[in-house]
Amino acid sequence: MSESATPVLLADGESLSAAMLRRLFIGQCLVLIMHLPFMPLWLLAVAALVAWRRHRQLIARAPRASVTLRLAAIALLCVALWAQYGGFGDLEALLGVLIGIYLLKLLETRTRRDARVVVGIGFVVLTASFLHDQSIFMALGAVAAATWLVHSLVMLSGGAQARPNRVAWRETAWLLGLSAPLMVALFIVMPRLGPLWSLPTLERASTGLSDSMAPGDIAKLSRSDARAFRVSFAGPVPAPAERYWRVYTLSHFDGERWSRETPEALAAMLERPLSDFAKTARRNPFAADTFTSAATDRSGGVTGSGSTSGGSSRYRTEFLLEPDSRPWRPSLGTPLASPERQRFLGDGTFEGVAALSSRGLMSLASSGEAPAFASPAGRAWHTLLPRGRNPRTLALAKRLWQDAEGDPEAYMAAVMARFGEAPYRYTLEPPRLAGEHRVDDFLFDSQAGYCSHYASATAVLARAVGIPARVVAGFQGGERHPDGHLTVRDYDAHAWVEVWHDGAWRRLDPTAVIAPERIEQGTAALSAGSQAFLADAGLSPLRFRDVAWVNRARLAWERLEYRWQLQVVGYESRDREALLSQLLQALETPWQSFKALKERISSLASSGAGALRLGAEVLGVLMLAALVVVGVQAGARRWRRPSTLRELLLEDAAWLARHGYPPRPGESPAAHLRRLAAASSGDEPSPDEPGLARGRAADLQQRQRDLKAASQALAEAIERVYYAPLDERERRRWHEAFHARRRRWRRAFRRVNRCRGRGAGRLARWRQTWHLGR
């Protein structure tokens, strides 16, 4: 037995065919595809098992899914999600429950109401996919899935007379076209309201950079091309050697790893209030004395100007941050002010008030330099070293300190100069250090390392002679795009050192001494011959930067995606106000044109010739307006065409009534057409009539015969569609035949009417004259 021969009975006596069930399953697959890059792949197996079970039930090889079976399926789904996520506290787990229920709903879909519920849940699950990502691909996929779901609703609304597929797609396009202007208007004018309730955030990290570091950790990030953030400048873009993006300040060293002590830990350890180490504000309270003015514009920007005490320029930046469950935020040097409240830390970094579950925009004013204020932890905290570790390094520091005669600046210059000499080298694949004295092993044995090796050794050498020092982990550089914005990726991760000297922190980067090309040109400049660079991104387009057209295509796509995130996803109240202001300015132009036209009318009406000219201009404007109105009405009539078979037949009956052939009471459409066919058999032309009249009569008789045949054929198609026991394939074929025969019948009717009219038409007269001439 075929699938189409065994429909599922509906509550109202109609049937949901196998084709409609397949349509619902395809809709589920389209929605599921939106989630698959972020959800477990075994959800595909759930969808396939449900479709297989529903197919077997449809062809009568399996009983209906019982309540026990459906409850067992839901229980198994929950167990699988619990095993996958370890509970239901994560947003992914909750989304998994929603998707699973959407897929399992197909097991009990029997009525048209059930099918509509499936489609409705599909819209909810489709909307939830934007919790994962809001990229262009997600938007295009959502449009495709939503179009299919709307098309399914259109097909479900047909009742007993299912719409032809072509007509249903036309109605779907009409519905989407009607809703698009409303969607755009709501997007522009509606304010962005905060959530009415809180949801668990997605656990994710935009970058592998962490708040603890051992020599070699940052080298692992060169294997990844993951994007950390993007940034644009409201002014000059800093040179590559000045792009130091601070993220973490690492001040605790245990002999192997540098780590960051949280403000809560420092407050508890030093027995001081938490406000000494972290404060939430729009301006950095720790840097209040280092710049002159930092007025914060709540509506969206940081205004004013200022500089650090060291005279460095201040940058105004707008970051597009990737989603991250950690609250870290980057800054170009010391963060100074932001339109939103941030948590500023006493170590010269800052955090967001909450983690980012999706991409977000952040405006920031920063100094571009190391902090010019002392750390609240104190000088002694930044000179601590573990006892009994790295004795050779301590001996080297003592010797260099003596050579510098106790001058900190000369001492640090000697340390930096030492790294610039052979045999020290910079490598993306440093040897592993596993001993107890790792700084000793690096300085005196391997003498090859990445930025974290040199930063760690420099900080230890500074602390060994009592100079306060700390390691800063962040990013350095960034790829500049043609439109001016920068993209910073994982492989731009970097570590450098800050030492306290002359009442301010000074940035020291030993990498700039041993590998200046890394600072000036980025990590990619050192990738030649290295197997580690982008090792985890084998298909990354960054591997083909040397191929001109590939690189241009990559940059063009990244620019488009950046604009999408900035202007569509990141559309905020300030953008709405700016757009409305532009619209108001645009409306002023027609008003000014109207005033100019009014003055012109007054001047022309003052003279006789001017009045005639004015009348011609007004007449031309009215004719143009009439053409526009006629065009709009024609387009509206075209889109308002009936779609179901019943609506088409009612329209044809009204059309015949307007032409003098109304239906009789109780007469069916087929009987009405057969009566019209019987009335269309004309008499033979009389041989006594004049030649021209006889030619017209012959032409009318031929047209009447065509109308009779077309009417009978259309009546047959109507009876077939309404009353014949047809399967799905035959019904679709006769639907197509009905539309073709209907068009042929309307053409024949119009030809008869034109020939019967007072003027039979020039074409008919020319044809008759040609026959007479022959």
Image (tube, rainbow, N blue to C red):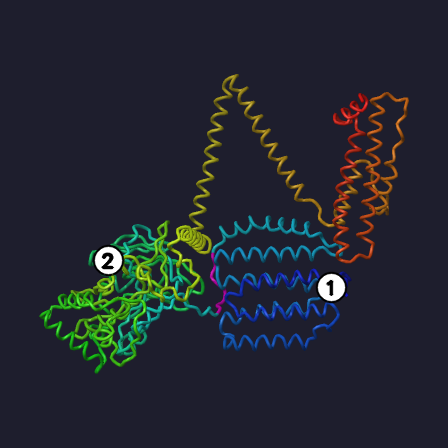
Residue 532 percent location from the top left of the image = 36, 67
Residue projecting furthest to the top: 608
* Nearer to the camera, 326 or 43: 43
Taking the view exactly as shown, the residue that stands out farthest to the bottom is: 388
Q: Amino acid at mark 1?
A: Glu
Residue 333: x percent and y percent? 27, 61
Per the model, the C-alpha gap separating discs 1 and 2 is 77 Å
Q: Give the side of residue 564 with respect to residue 161, left or right.
A: left
Q: Which quarter of the figure is the C terminus placed in? A: top right
Q: Residue at x 24, y 57 (%)?
A: 291
Q: Amino acid at mark 2?
A: Phe
- 120 sits to left or right of 458: right
Q: Dividing the picture into quarters, in which one does residue 710 lie?
A: top right
Q: Quadrant of residue 389?
A: bottom left
Contact between marks 1 and 2 (CB within 8 A): the answer is no
Q: Is residue 434 above or below residue 164?
A: below
Magenta range is 192-199
Crowding at mark 1 (Cα within 10 Å: few <14, some 14-19, many 20+) = some
SS under mark 1: helix
196 is within the stretch colored magenta = yes
Q: Which residue is mark 1?
A: 3
| Placement of 586 over or under 487, stated as above or below | above
The answer to which of marks 1 and 2 sits earlier in the sequence is 1
- Helix, strand or loop at label 2? It is loop
Which residue is located at x 76 percent, y 49 percent? Answer: 646
Residue, disc 2:
291
Decide which of 426, 759 is in the foreground and name it.
Answer: 426
**Where is residue 561 drawn, in percent x and y?**
44, 54
| 619 in the magenta segment | no
